[in-house]
Image (cartoon, helix red, strand yellow):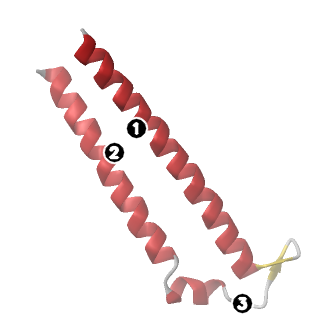
Amino acid sequence: MKRLRTKILHSMQLRESWIIFFILGIIMMTFPFLHIFNKPILLFGVPLLFLYLTVGWIISIIVIYLFMIASRHENNTKEENSEQ
């Protein structure tokens, strides 16, 4: 019973995390945030807005990769438990 409860909570947390990161990604692309970084400032010779978008894109790819690993791990444990 405890094992089932743990799996359900982990599954719910994974779904909630997907939703939170999706909403955060949308918020990062709204006008106020883009306006904050749309300044004539160069960081390492790169415009600040371009750097903001590139770093945000890279971070989102990493987060999606981590979610996919967690999802695969969850599916593998489900398959192992159903075989037993």
Residue 18 shown left or right of residue 34 in the figure: left
Closest to the camera, between mark 1 and mark 2, is: 1
Residues at discs 2 and 3 in contact (Cβ within 8 Å): no
As drawn, 69 above or below 1: below
Q: Earlier in the sequence, mark 1 or mark 3?
A: 3
Furthest residue in direction right, as rendered:
45
Residue 73 shown left or right of residue 60 in the figure: left
Which amino acid is tagged 1? Ser
Q: CA distance from mark 2 to mark 3?
A: 36 Å
Residues at discs 1 and 2 in contact (Cβ within 8 Å): yes
Residue name at image x 88 percent, y 76 percent:
45
Q: Earlier in the sequence, mark 1 or mark 2?
A: 2
Q: Quadrant of residue 56?
A: bottom right
**Image quadrant containing the C terminus:** top left
As drawn, 18 above or below 52: above
Question: Which residue lies under the disc numbered 3?
Answer: 39
- Across and down, in percent, residue 44 comes to 86, 71
Which amino acid is tagged 2? Leu
Q: Quadrant of residue 83?
A: top left
Q: Quadrant of residue 59?
A: bottom right
Element at label 3:
loop
Element at label 1:
helix
Question: Which residue lies under the disc numbered 1?
Answer: 71
Residue name at image x 30 percent, y 53 percent:
16
Question: Which residue lies under the disc numbered 2?
Answer: 14
Which amino acid is tagged 3? Lys
Q: CA distance from mark 1 to mark 3?
A: 39 Å
As drawn, 20 above or below 42: above
